Each structure stands twice: as C-alpha cells, then as structure tokens.
C-alpha cells in the first residue's frame, strides 16, 4: 500500500513538475536579466521569480539539478522574452549572453543630436568622436551614392531608426549601419523618380530635412513639398525658419527675431534663394517620400501651428 501511494504521489508530482516546466509567465516585450558573478542557483531562481520571468523557484532549481547545469550557468546580461522555465534554464546554461545594445535615433535629429545621444548612452566619450567620423569622405569606398558629396558631412544620410549593435561597436560601425539602412530605404523606384525629375539625391535630402522640421503629418508634408519645389522653380525665396534655426541652434518652436532674419548665411532662406547648402537634419521615410512625390496645388504659402 505504501509503495502504491508513493508511486501515485510521484506520478502526480511528475505531472505537476512537467506542467510547471512548460508553463510561461506572460509579459510584454523583453526583460533584461543580469546574473552577477558568484551568484548561486538559488539566488538566480529567486531573482527570476522576483522579476516575474518564471513563477517557481523549486522547478527551476530542480530542473538545473536534473540536467547537471549547476556550474554551466554563466554570469552576464540576458535579454529574455516570455518562455518556459525549461527554455529559460537552457538559455542561461548555454550562455546566450546579450552583448548587444539598442540605439534609437529619432526622425529629424541632426548629427549633433545623435552625437549627444551616444554620449548619454555611454557609447562614446565625446561628441567629436561621432562628428569627426560622420564625413562622406570616410565612407565613399563602400557607398557610391556619397561620391558626389565626398567633401560634405553626412547630415541627411544617417537614417533615423532603432538599431541593435554590439556593445563594443565603433562609431564607424554604427554609422555604417545607418548608411546601409538609408541605401535600402531609398528604393530603385525612388532613385529613378529623382533622376526623372532632373534632381539628385542630395537635393532631395535637403528638401526632405526641411519638410521633416517644418511639417508633421504625411498629407501636409506632400502639400508643403509641392509648395517649396514650386517656389524654387520660379526662383522665389523658400523663407523657411528651420534652416536658419539649424545654424544658430534655436529650437524649432521658438520664433525668429528680426535681427536673426538679417543673419548673412546661405542657410538664411529669407535672404538667399535656392536650397540651403546641406540638409539640416536626418529625415525619416515619410519626409523623404514627400520630397520625392510632392502634391501639386494652387498654394504658395503654408503655416504650421
């Protein structure tokens, strides 16, 4: 009778254990889990439950003991998604340590904004490390579309997006990823359309950067693109605030003063006709498409509130 009871208990205990082993604690997105060197299996199990990655310390510890992985779990940082205790244990034992970081560059950021962000994220020590590298001449061998602007900074070409990069990535590696992304986003159809309009990529990027800074919605961007290209066609001054604010470092929401409007600079599109010399930020896909595919209208002026 005792043996039968033990068998029954072990049978149901095994069922419960297997159920626990396969069960998943649901959470949104990813969780960063850190194992400090010298932590015991018990401490790791406690932290996993505490951070709501798993729900049972006992099942985790027992499974580690069954597999003989007590000394296999490696210290480091792990990026965990919702998974079973079995999968969590295997991940920690195999040592899939996360050696990447996520970098998010916002649409409309200028190069200086990107440089300051990388300093804040402790990726680089100074903004100069980024700005001195972000020159077209350093990347023309790999990216032929930069040959015509080889003496210019890469403002406009550093495509804003979220990137996963290795923690020890160099500035050169990060910029290369951005240029590769830009090269992919600018499709062959878009390049054909640019050539058909008698324009070049750089002119389009300058216009796209203005649109990015001046207008918020996709539909309005297409309309404003039509207005600005039309002004250029008749040699009318663009009269956009954003390009002048770019060189004086003024926030886009703040109005320009009469004194600032008299600044003698090619970026002052109130005084000088044509496009400014360079893009004024790094535009996203919406602004680039608006610059390539403007919407014609009878409008000559616009106001962004």
Image (cartoon, rainbow, N blue to C red):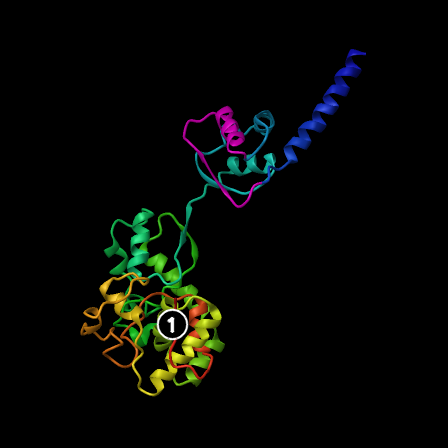
Task: Check if residue 50 falls in the magenta segment.
Answer: yes
> In the rendering, at what x and y percent does residue 104 appear?
41, 54
Q: Residues within 10 Å of mark 1 (few under 14, many from 20)?
A: few
Screen quadrant of the N terminus:
top right
> In the rendering, at what x and y percent does residue 288 appear?
42, 71
Q: Determine if residue 184 is in view.
A: no
Residue occupying image coordinates x 19% and y 73%: 262
Q: What residue is pinned by disc 1? A: 303
What segment carries the magenta color? Answer: 27-52
Q: From this view, report whether residue 24 is shown above or below residue 267.
A: above
Residue situated in front as seen by the camera: 219 or 50? 219
Q: From this view, report whether residue 248 is shown above or below residue 119.
A: below
Residue occupying image coordinates x 62% and y 37%: 24
Residue situated in front as seen by the camera: 205 or 242? 242
Give the farthest residue toward the bottom: 234
> In the rendering, at what x and y percent does residue 121 appear?
34, 47
The reply, left or right, for residue 111 in relation to residue 99 is left
Q: Quadrant of residue 235?
A: bottom left
Residue occupying image coordinates x 30% and y 76%: 239
> In the rendering, at what x and y percent does residue 87 appear?
58, 38
Q: Quadrant of residue 256?
A: bottom left
Give the farthest residue toward the top: 2
Kindly state the secondary structure of the residue where label 1 is placed.
loop
């Amino acid at each position: 009778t005792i043996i039968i009871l033990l068998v029954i208990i072990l049978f149901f205990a095994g069922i419960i254990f297997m159920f626990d082993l396969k069960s998943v604690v649901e959470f949104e997105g990813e969780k960063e889990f850190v194992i400090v060197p010298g932590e015991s299996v018990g401490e790791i199990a406690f932290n996993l439950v505490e951070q709501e990655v798993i729900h049972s310390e006992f099942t985790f510890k027992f499974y580690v003991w069954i597999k003989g992985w007590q000394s296999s779990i490696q210290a480091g940082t792990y990026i965990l998604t919702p998974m079973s205790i079995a999968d969590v244990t295997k991940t920690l034992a195999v040592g899939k340590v996360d050696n990447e970081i996520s970098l998010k560059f916002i649409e409309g950021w200028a190069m200086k904004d990107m440089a300051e962000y990388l300093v804040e994220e402790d990726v680089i020590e100074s903004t100069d490390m980024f700005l001195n590298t972000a020159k077209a001449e350093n990347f023309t061998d790999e990216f032929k579309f930069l040959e015509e602007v080889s003496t210019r900074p890469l403002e406009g070409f550093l495509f804003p997006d979220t990137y996963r990069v290795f923690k020890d990535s160099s500035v050169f590696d990060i910029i290369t990823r951005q240029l590769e992304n830009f090269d992919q986003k600018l499709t062959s159809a878009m390049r054909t359309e640019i050539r058909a309009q008698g324009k070049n990529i750089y002119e389009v990027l300058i216009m796209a950067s203005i649109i990015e800074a001046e207008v918020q919605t996709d539909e309005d961007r297409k309309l404003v693109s039509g207005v600005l290209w039309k002004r250029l066609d008749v040699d009318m001054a663009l009269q956009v605030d954003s390009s002048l604010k770019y060189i004086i470092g003024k926030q886009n929401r703040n109005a320009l003063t009469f004194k600032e409007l008299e600044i003698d600079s090619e970026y002052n599109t109130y005084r000088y006709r044509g496009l400014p010399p360079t893009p004024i930020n790094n535009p996203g896909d919406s602004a680039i498409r608006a610059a390539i595919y403007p919407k014609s209208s009878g409008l000559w002026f616009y106001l962004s509130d």
